[in-house]
Amino acid sequence: MAERMRWNAIESITEKTGSQQVAAGRIEKRRRNAVSDAKDNKNRRLDTGPLCGDG
């Protein structure tokens, strides 16, 4: 399922040209980073318990 979605994304990017393609790649990378950050934050919250403001 995820593999098919990835291929669809790749195909849609390859249909675009030049700077559009670069921008699409940037957006995709940012989205992927946001997803992994969310996972990291979730895992960290589970590890440390409630977060305090005092660091």
Image (cartoon, helix red, strand yellow):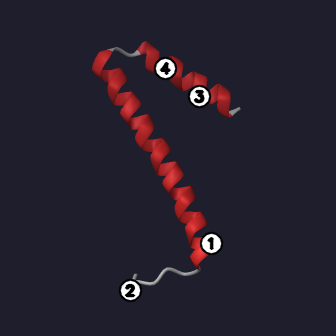
Of circles 3 and 2, the one toward us is 2
Relative to 27, is 45 on the left or the right? right
Q: Earlier in the sequence, mark 3 or mark 2?
A: 3
Label 1 and label 4: CA atoms lie apart by 37 Å
For label 4, the residue is 12
Percent x, y of residue 46: 62, 72
Depicted 31 relative to depicted 53: above or below:
above
Tell me where residue 43 appears, x and y as whole percent. 60, 65
C-alpha span from label 3 to label 2: 41 Å
Left or right, 27 with respect to 4, comes to left
Alpha-carbon distance for marks 2 and 1? 18 Å
Which quadrant would residue 17 be assigned to in this image?
A: top left
Which residue lies at the image location 39% right of the left edge and 36% below the top edge?
27
Q: What number is the disc on residue 54?
A: 2
| Occupied quadrant, residue 14 | top left
The answer to whether marks 1 and 4 mark residues whose Cβ atoms lie closer than 8 Å is no
- Which class describes the residues within 10 Å of circle 4: few (<14), some (14-19), or many (20+)? few
Q: Give the amino acid type for the residue marked by disc 3 in the picture.
A: Arg
Dot 3 crowding, Cα within 10 Å, few <14, some 14–19, many 20+: few
Residue at 54% x, 59% y is 40
Question: Reading the chain from its start, which is encountered first: label 3 or label 1?
Answer: 3
Which numbered marker is on residue 22?
Answer: none
Residue lying at 28% horizontally and 21% vertically, measured from the top left: 19
Who comes first in sequence, dot 1 or dot 4? 4
Q: Earlier in the sequence, mark 2 or mark 4?
A: 4
Q: Amino acid at mark 4?
A: Ser
Q: Which residue is mark 1?
A: 46
Quadrant, the N terminus: top right
User: Is 47 displayed left or right of 16 in the figure?
Assistant: right
Q: Secondary structure at mark 2?
A: loop
Q: Dot 3 corresponds to which residue?
A: 6
